[in-house]
Amino acid sequence: MHRRRLFHRSILAAASLAACGLLSLPVTAHAQGDAGYPKKPITLVVPYPAGGVADQFARAFATALGERLGQPVVIDNRAGANGNIGSALAARQQPADGYTLLLGSTSTLAINPHLYASMGYDPLKDLQPVTLTHQMPNVLLVGAQTPYKTVADVVAAAKAQPGRIDYGSAGNGNTMHLAGVLFERRSGTQLVHVPYKGGPPALMDVLAGQIPMMFNNLPAVVTYKSANKLRVLAVADTKRSAVLPDVPTFAEAGVPDVVSVVWNGILVRRGTPQPIVDRLNKEMVAVLQAPAFRKPLEQQGYEVLSSTPAQFEALLKKDHAAMGRLVKEAGIKLD
């Protein structure tokens, strides 16, 4: 059991993206002098377990990108340490030639640096942003066997049994964990955090009745909700989700200011030749803006994005600094 104390307003990823002008912007990149890149298969490191929402998006993206580049894009799942193991692998990959890509996120790039004494990489120094790919809100879900039908039910039970009701997440310091901490602060409750090694095993335990609830990325739960295997009580966003229009936001459910939206994007090792970065951005943005690619993913709850490298880097620096201030002010530490 792990307890964290955090007092802050959650970083509004969607607001940050809008402020930086990053929502599905057309990009024109002219890559010259890339010497015929790519000449061999490319590896896309996903620092999370196979089967999760990050992996599912990455596999669809890799297939479409490989078709445009004329070379296979192979997924390499390197889970562990809340995404640090795979991220460090990609950040240290030699040479910096564009043949190793990384799927980064708010957790691995903006939050982890302020929670871990050593990660094996520095997101700002070691990684070059290429483009944002998507964002998704966290949601509060409960098992179908639980008595909780609304957020108010959870709040009432938690206040009646302080420190006795569990909630799961993908791990310490993950955005799912911080969404739970934020919910506690805003609702005046005290829950028990149960960290897992990734979102999928935590979700399986909710479905099996081993834990009553968890915070998870929206795309992970759409299918289970449709099959009535769990209940989604609220969306941690400023607006309702188009794929779950019947689910209220936390504000609508009576607990304001619970917003937790995670963004994701592709990066390469810093020092990768600019023509290769430009070529990758051009082809990736073409994939991300294609209706045939976007629509199936949007139906699953992903909000597909695209950006220039500079726009992605600006967002990364902004949220990296903001999360650093919040972690320091709140005194958050990992056990």
Image: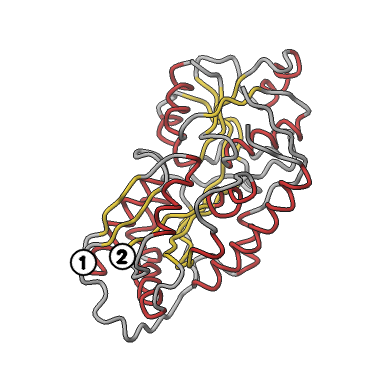
Q: In this view, does 32 lie to the left or right of 127?
A: left
Seen at 54% across and 32% down, the residue is 169
Q: Which amino acid does label 1 sit on?
A: Lys
Q: Which amino acid does label 2 sit on?
A: Tyr
Between residue 27 and residue 272, name the one nearer to us. Answer: 272
Label at residue 58: none
Asked if residue 315 is positioned above or below residue 203 in the image, the reply reads below
Q: What colour scheme does the image use? A: secondary structure
Residue 229 screen position, x and y as percent: 44, 23
| Quadrant in which residue 190 is drawn | top right
Q: Quadrant of the C terminus?
A: top right
Residue 334 screen position, x and y as percent: 63, 36
Q: Is residue 188 left or right of residue 266?
A: right
Q: Are marks 1 and 2 in contact (CB under 8 Å)?
A: yes
Mark 1, other Cα within 10 Å: few <14 / some 14–19 / many ≥20:
few
Asked if residue 46 is positioned above or below residue 158 in the image, the reply reads below
Seen at 71% across and 19% down, the residue is 158
Between residue 147 and residue 86, name the one nearer to us. Answer: 86
Q: Count the marks.
A: 2
Mark 2, other Cα within 10 Å: few <14 / some 14–19 / many ≥20:
many
Label 1 sits on a secondary structure element that is loop
Which residue is under mark 1?
40
Asked if residue 287 is positioned above or below residue 142 in the image, the reply reads below
Q: In which quarter of the image is the N terminus?
A: top right
Residue 57 screen position, x and y as percent: 38, 50
Seen at 56% across and 68% down, the residue is 313
Label 2 sits on a secondary structure element that is loop
Which residue is under mark 2?
99
Sequence order check, earlier mark of 1 and 2:
1
Between residue 112 and residue 285, name the one nearer to us. Answer: 112
